[in-house]
């Protein structure tokens, strides 16, 4: 009997996702434990090993992007040596460039190996729910909701969105009320956890996914009446049986939801939005003085500029400036070039793929929608480390299709046969067609 070892291909992306607190808390209860920093270094090292092992699976665009990233890191090291006499004077700043390495590692690995998507989503959802139930049970109480005690990090709540999109697309393509129920239960949990940024990114991700579905860009989706009716009836029943009873029993719940919506509508005047605006105003002059390449290492030495409501800085000097915005963080440290270094290639590649007429697989559409809403998430928070790995995986399974796929009589995705499968070893390591990205239909197993 032949043992199927395909499950092992879930380990690289799970290793990257384990940088999130919801997963590493099982092993390291103390969030300040130095071993967590060592693990982030280990992920960087493992990313380099994967890049070296699967380098021939990087497309021309990706290896050029990798080359630019390594060149930027080398230039920063030279600047460090020239100004401070050591090659890496402030690891905090270097980490912002090294964080990109999982993109290339996951891209190269999943161009070569299929992703067991169903297993990934089961493990991902199980880990998040178990962590919430055992480590943060108070966050599930009504009093925690009313007092805004979330208990669950925003990065973990944002990660909940990925399995939600996956099970929604699986329902649309394959049916199954259980898949639809999981989708709505995850949405309810996201609302209950009260991370308003995640609310907005969820709305955007569902809208992007819906747009792909309505324009016929998701393969296998059937929008028939038997498929659509449960989508309307299930949330209605859940609301009548659960939500309405809670609201009628405790009107404070409705008032709390109204207050959260008001915070979103008046982002510049109340809630955490005004706090972020104050932080941006504190650093605006430094961003404007160094618009192209940012302050880099000198920025780390800059005394804390954000004082909040009192006379004391919010964080101690020489600990980093802890920006609550991906864009402000990159602009401050690396300027416009730093933002483009991260966003230019993914946005261009995914936009190019979206414009092609070849449909996405349901799983691929979920990843594309999730990666797209990360642009909005970055307005309020810096990107979590796992997001870079997810983006690399997304680019691997949703890269542009070659022109040959559009020729009359030629299938968009060639059948996977021993003759055209990527080699496991050898000198050339070429894919069956020049520039062909690993297609969603064969690179992802649901």
Image (cartoon, rainbow, N blue to C red):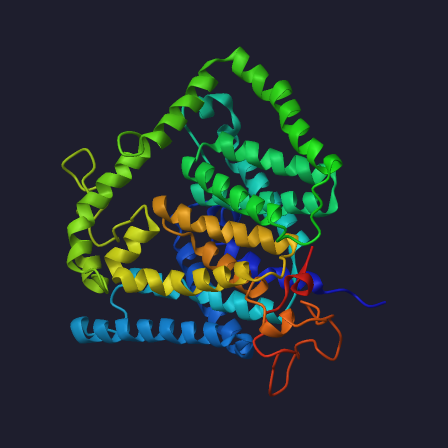
Query: Which residue lies at the image location 69% right of the left edge and 65% below the top edge?
Result: 442
Query: Which residue lies at the image location 67% right of the left edge and 37% below the top edge?
Result: 180
Q: Is residue 147 above or below residue 308?
A: above
Location of residue 263 in the rendering, given as x and y in whole percent from the top left corner: 35, 29
Query: Which residue lies at the image location 67% right of the left edge and 52% below the top edge?
Result: 118
Query: Is 280 positioned to the left or the right of 182 in the image?
Result: left
The quadrant in which the C terminus is found is: bottom right
Location of residue 433 in the rendering, given as x and y in whole percent from the top left corner: 63, 78
Query: Which residue lies at the image location 48% right of the left edge and 64% below the top edge?
Result: 349
The quadrant in which the N terminus is found is: bottom right
Q: Is residue 392 visible?
A: yes
Location of residue 204 in the rendering, given as x and y in whole percent from the top left corner: 48, 43
In this orientation, which residue lies closer to the viewer: 265 or 377? 265
Q: Is residue 42 visible?
A: no
In this orientation, which residue lies closer to the viewer: 358 or 368? 358
In this orientation, which residue lies closer to the viewer: 89 or 234? 234
Which residue extends farthest bottom?
427
Q: Is residue 9 above or below residue 112?
A: above
Which residue extends farthest top?
249
Location of residue 259 in the rendering, given as x and y in whole percent from the top left corner: 38, 23
Residue 343 picture quarter: bottom left
Give the total of numbered labels.
Answer: 0
Which residue extends farthest front?
408
Query: Is 188 positioned to the left or the right of 307 in the image?
Result: right
Residue 181 picture quarter: top right
């Amino acid at each position: 009997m032949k043992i199927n070892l395909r499950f092992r291909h879930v380990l690289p992306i799970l290793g990257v996702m384990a940088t999130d607190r919801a997963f590493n808390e099982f092993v390291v209860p103390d969030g300040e434990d130095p071993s967590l920093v060592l693990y982030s270094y280990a992920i960087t090292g493992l990313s380099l090993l994967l890049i070296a092992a699967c380098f021939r699976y990087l497309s021309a665009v990706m290896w050029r992007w990798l080359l630019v990233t390594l060149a930027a890191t080398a230039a920063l090291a030279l600047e460090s040596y020239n100004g401070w006499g050591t090659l890496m004077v402030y690891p905090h700043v270097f980490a912002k460039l090294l964080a990109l390495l999982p993109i290339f590692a996951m891209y190269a690995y999943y161009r070569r190996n299929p992703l067991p998507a169903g297993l990934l989503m089961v493990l991902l959802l199980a880990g998040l729910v178990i962590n919430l139930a055992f480590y943060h049970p108070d966050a599930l109480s009504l009093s925690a909701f009313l007092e805004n005690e979330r208990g669950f990090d925003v990065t973990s709540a944002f990660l909940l969105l990925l399995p939600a999109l996956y099970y929604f697309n699986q329902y649309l393509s394959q049916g199954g009320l259980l898949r639809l129920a999981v989708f709505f239960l995850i949405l309810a949990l996201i609302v209950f956890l009260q991370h308003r940024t995640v609310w907005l990114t969820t709305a955007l991700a569902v809208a992007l996914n819906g747009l792909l579905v309505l324009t016929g860009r998701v393969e296998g989706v059937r929008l028939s009446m038997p498929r659509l009716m449960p989508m309307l009836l299930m949330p209605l029943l859940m609301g009548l049986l659960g939500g309405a009873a809670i609201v009628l029993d405790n009107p404070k719940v409705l008032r709390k939801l109204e207050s959260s919506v008001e915070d979103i509508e008046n982002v510049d005047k109340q809630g955490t939005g005004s706090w972020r605006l104050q932080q941006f105003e504190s650093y605006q002059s430094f961003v404007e003085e160094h618009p192209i390449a940012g302050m880099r290492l000198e920025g780390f030495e800059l005394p804390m500029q954000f004082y909040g409501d009192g006379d004391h800085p919010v964080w101690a000097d020489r600990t980093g400036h802890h920006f609550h915005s991906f864009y402000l963080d990159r602009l401050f440290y690396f300027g416009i070039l730093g933002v483009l270094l991260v966003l230019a290639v993914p946005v261009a590649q995914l936009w190019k793929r979206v414009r092609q007429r070849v449909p996405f697989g349901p799983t691929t559409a979920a990843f594309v929608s999730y990666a797209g809403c990360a642009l909005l998430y970055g307005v309020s928070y810096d990107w979590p480390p796992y997001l870079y790995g997810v983006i690399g995986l997304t680019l691997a399974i949703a890269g542009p299709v070659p022109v040959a796929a559009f020729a009359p009589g030629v299938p968009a995705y060639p059948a996977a046969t021993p003759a055209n499968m990527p080699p496991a070893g050898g000198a050339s390591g070429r894919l069956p067609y020049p520039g062909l990205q690993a297609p969603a239909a064969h690179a992802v197993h649901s």
